[in-house]
Amino acid sequence: MTLHTTKHPAASSCAHLHLDEALLVVSMDDNAEAMLTRNHGVLRLVQRRLLAPQAQADLDRCLTQAAAGQPSGMLVARDAPWPLTLVCTPSPKPAQHRTGVVVRLRDPLGEQPDQAWLQRLFDLTPAEADITAALAMGRHCVEIALARGVQANTVRAHLKRAMAKTGTSHQVALVSLVLRSAAMVVAAAGEPRAR
């Protein structure tokens, strides 16, 4: 059987693979192919079988549960600040007329806030956008201050102005807004993804 890939106009941090009743991959989108290539050490495709060398038992459990009609998920650890997330669900039989499993992969480091878009969308200054982006990528105020060569209170002042401009009342809400906004773009290959 030939493996089919679905082409999409833009890359994404989310990918989909479709497995048949034997739990062999029958199709995947181009994002899945790219994500598997980037994370080959922890998740790979070998002879149409999805493998997780350090977590094969967990992956097999997820796939088997989904094939039995029970959605399941797992984290795939890797040498990065955050793991890949993997969710397995039964294939939607009425729409596809086939049994099997849909695997959805998400790379939390695959997207990052674009500072120029943060400035345009929320009318932030360059400093406010830079600090807001760093916060959204998991950096702490003290860490941001050290990287910028300023006091932590200066960072907090920029964040307060960013929160006022975005209509958010605390840092968690600001990060949540940024992560759900159109300012999130696919991280370019070779760019540092999280500092």
Image (cartoon, rainbow, N blue to C red):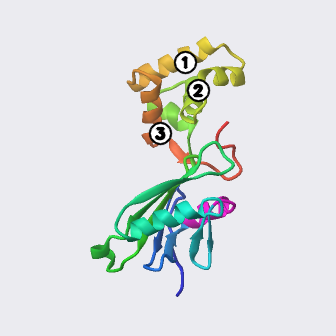
Secondary structure under the numbered disc 3 in the rendered image: helix
Q: Residues within 10 Å of mark 1 (few under 14, many from 20)?
A: some
Tell me residue 50's x, y (percent). Answer: 57, 70
Q: Are marks 3 and 1 in contact (CB under 8 Å)?
A: no
Amino acid type of the residue that numbered disc 1 sits on in the rendered structure: His
Whether the magenta-drawn stretch holds residue 37 is answered as yes
Q: Residue 76 magenta-drawn? A: no
Q: Amino acid at mark 3?
A: Leu
Q: Nearer the viewer, residue 88 or 94?
A: 88
Identify whether 152 is placed above or below 2.
above
Q: Are marks 1 and 2 in contact (CB under 8 Å)?
A: yes
The residue carrying mark 1 is 158
Task: State the quadrant of the C terminus.
Answer: top right
Number of the front mark, 3 or 1: 3
Q: Amino acid at mark 2?
A: Ile
Q: Which residue is mark 3?
A: 179
- Give the CA separation, mark 3 to mark 1: 18 Å
Structural distance between the alpha carbons of marks 1 and 2 = 7 Å
Q: Is residue 156 above or below residue 11?
A: above
Distance between mark 3 and mark 2 Cα atoms: 14 Å
How many numbered marks, from 0 up? 3
First reached walking from the N terminus: tag 1 or tag 2: 2
Mark number displayed over residue 131? 2
Instruction: Provide the residue span drawn in magenta.
Output: 32-42
Residue 184, horizontal then vertical, whole percent: 51, 43
Determine if residue 6 is in view: no
How many residues crowd mark 3 within 10 Å: few (<14), some (14–19), many (20+)? some
Q: Position of residue 59 (x, y in %)?
A: 53, 63
**Dominant secondary-structure state across the stretch colored magenta:** helix
Check the image and report above or below for 119 versus 46.
above
Identified at 68% across, 15% down, the residue is 150
The secondary element bearing badge 1 is classed as helix
